[in-house]
Every structure is written in structure tokens, then in C-alpha cells.
Image: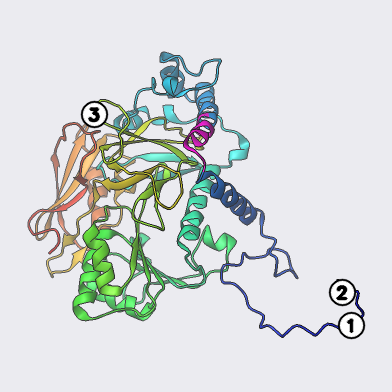
Amino acid sequence: MDYSGARRPDPPEMPVTRSPADPISAVPGLAWPAVGSNAAASLLALQWQLQRSERWPRDVLEAHQLRQLDLLLRHCAANVPFWRERLANVGLPNDGPLDWDAWRRLPVLSRTEVREAGAALHAGAIPPEHGKRGQGFTTGSTGRPLQCLKTELSLFFWHGSVLREMIWHGWDPAGKLAIIREAKNGSAPAPDGLVLAGWGTPVSTVFATGPAAMLDIRTPVAQQADWLMRQNPDYLVTWPSNLKPLARHCRESGLRPERLRVVRTLAEVVSPELRALCREAWDAQLVDCYSAEEVGYIGIQCPAGEQLHVQSENLLLELLDEDGQPCGPGETGQVVVTPLHNFAMPLLRYALGDAAVAGSACACGRTLPTLSRVLGRTRDRLLLPGGQRRFLENPSEVFAPIAAIRRYQIAQVAPDTLEVRLDAARKLTSDEQARLTAALHRSTMHPFAVRFSDAAWPDADTPQKFRDVVCEFAPADA
């Protein structure tokens, strides 16, 4: 404060501005500083913790993981029939604190075991503070769809990773978002798609977002390109296998949305060639992530490079070689994960069916473990008789409830014929076959002839490239 008695000059008038990333205030009459809703406040409080833990020394991070794993094991022993017996067989949990030697006595859990265990993997009780239970389906990219249970708390940590990714990369939630992916029941048809209220949960929980729009991924590529030009978004989200023909078409046609600067991919493998294609076609950066329906976010691409940082606050990731030993940088192994916070259907040392390459220490300064590459997730498009290429809307919601189906593959064996190859415990009934046929007709929007055949895949739980949808009578990238 100035006590000289002289009048200080008035400060220059400054324009009143609003940062596009200002949180939304939930209190009437209060715009800034914002006081958010309980959900928004919790998500922002989680970000504060994550910004600290992502730079912890490795031993500190692992000590915190062990604390959470110990709580999870004790919950499993008390409430989950499958784990009560399996843990007892290896002397867990014990009276002392959990250590890594004790943890690694627990056998790796396969997808086949998860399917066969069924309700025995469901907890009889969960802490009420973990919220309601919900059901999900895996995408079936290994050909073995699963039903999985989650809690509201486990979904909260998934949302925390979504916000973390946005913050890491400096994305502006006030920008426009365009999404090209499967649309349930044809809810986002060409040519206009579907207008969304905003970016959706969790971003819209915390921030006032810009507009968003969605288009069904089964739309022909030329129409996708036309829609993209009309939308002119800042951000585009789609599958890599859809992105490749779309970017090629735009490059060859000279179509470049003026505002597009980031393409965010999901669910499949990203190649260096695809990253280069995005730069050539649109001068846009490709950002990838690694997630799975049953476990949430696994890895987020580093903003300083292309390695994926493992989300170690949400799960324990073990990358194991053929002898079950941890992989070193540059080595390829099977991905084994343990979600730390899902008490509804705990998955301990769960082999996803993916393979990945261990990364090295990252120059960005974050100490979270890294993956340099994830292998084995890809999906073909079917070729319609008229020459259009079309993706399947996720068929797992139909396959997963039929418990007899251990694994499936949908193969287009002729221009107008699909073969559903099943590794099943019994022959499907005529009603089950009819339901699957009807679902495929809805998904492809074409009345393919559908036939069913028996199949078996050796080493079904070994990480490998497996395509749940294949086009066998024409090149996959035609």
C-alpha cells in the first residue's frame, strides 16, 4: 500500500477475457475463480495428485502400487469366490505387507479363465463408496469378447486419464471435436451425422467445451471426407484403419480442413507411416492411446514424443517374456495388467492378449513406465458388392452373452458372403444363429449371406496379431 499521500495513476484498462480452459463454476453469481461441482472438484483434485506422481522416483511409485494391491487382495480374499481359492493356493494375503516376490507367486490370469469363471469373479460385496456397478463388453479384437463389471469409482479413474491426456497435450476444450466411429443403431448417418451437445463426460464436467459432431464409421470414405470438410474441426477422433483411407483420399483430392491440427486414434495399431500420412494430408499431429474396455486407460502418448506412458496410478502393468520374466527396454512381451481400483470384478495379473515393446526412460522427465509400441490390434473393412468399404459396428454385444462361444472371427469369403468361424463349446442353436445373422445385417447395413463353421485357434491366450474381422477375397487396404 502507498502511504505517500500521492495519488497513483489508474491502471490501464484491460479487456476482460476468459480463458477457454477455465473450469465451469457451479455456484450462481460466481464466474471466477470457479467453484466447481463435486464431480468437477474431485476430477481436478485427482489431476493435482497425478501431476506429482508422474514424476516420482520408481521406488516411490511402486511402494504406492503395493499399498493399493494389498487392499485389493484382501478384498478379493473376503468377497470374490474365484480369488479366495486362488490366493490361498499361493499364501496370499499374508499377515505382513505385500512385496513383489509374493505378488509374482500369483499365476497369470488368461481370458479363457475369465470366461469360464463367470460370476465367480464377481464380488459379493463392494464398499458402498465405490458407487454402483455397471456392465461393459470388450471389443472382441482378440476374437474372445467378454462381459465385465465395473464400479463408478473405476470409471472415475478412467475419466481422470482422459483429462490428463488433454492437459498433457494442451488441447483446447473450446475447440470443435469431430468423431468418426461406430454409431449405435445408425444414430449418426451420412451426410450430416449427429450434432452433440459438447465434448461429453468428463471434459464437459469440468470445462465449458466447444461443439462436437459424430459420423457413423460405416459411411463411405468420400462422404466422410466431405463431412470432415464441412465440419472443419480442430480435433478428429477415429480408428487407425479408418484414418488411413480417409487421409489418403483427402491427400489425393487436395482436401485439407483449415482448422484441423490433431488426430486422435484409438483401439488399433498405429504405424509410423500413418503418422506421416496425417502430416502430409492435413499437417496434423497424430496422438494415440492404449486402452481396453475391461481395464481402462493403459498408456497415453507422451506430448514430447511417440512413446506411451503407462497409467501406473490406475493399474499395474507387467510386460513379461516367454519365461514370465519382466522385459527390458526394446524387448517384446505379453501385456499383463491389474486394475487397481475395480472391486466389482477384480482382474489380478490379467493377460489381455496383446503384445507390446518395452520403452525406455523418457526425455520429458515423467518417470512413469513406457511402451514404445503396442502390437496386434487391427480390424478389416468389408467390401460391399457396390464397391464401398464398410466397418462392422461392434458385434461383441451379441457374441459375448452366448457363453458357449470361446472365440469368433467374421470373414468375408466372397463379395456377398460372410463366414462366421466359431470356437465354441457346443453347436449354436438355430435361434442363436438367426440372432447373430440379424445382428450382422444391422451392423453392415447389407443382407450378406451368412454361414457358420467350426474353427479352433492354437494357443488362444498367446499374444499375437488376431483380426476378428477379415476380408479374404480382396486386399485389406484396397
Q: Which residue is mark 2?
A: 2
Q: Disc 2 residue type?
A: Asp
Q: Are marks 1 and 3 in contact (CB under 8 Å)?
A: no
Element marked by disc 2: loop
Q: Is residue 12 above or below residue 23?
A: below
Q: Quadrant of the N terminus?
A: bottom right
Residue 168 point in image, percent of width and height: 47, 58
**Mark 3, other Cα within 10 Å: few <14 / some 14–19 / many ≥20:** few
Q: Is residue 63 magenta?
A: yes
Q: Nearer the viewer, residue 81 or 25?
A: 25
Residue 175 point in image, percent of width and height: 48, 72
Q: Is residue 139 above or below residue 336?
A: below
Measure the C-alpha gap from mark 1 to mark 3: 80 Å
Q: Is residue 448 magenta?
A: no
Span shown in magenta: 56-66
Q: Residue furthest front?
A: 4
Question: Measuring 62% from the left and 36% from the top, which residue is drawn there?
Answer: 128
**Mark 2, other Cα within 10 Å: few <14 / some 14–19 / many ≥20:** few
In this rendering, position of residue 179 left or right of residue 80: left
In this rendering, position of residue 248 left or right of residue 53: left
The tally of labels here is: 3
**Camera sees residue 400:** yes
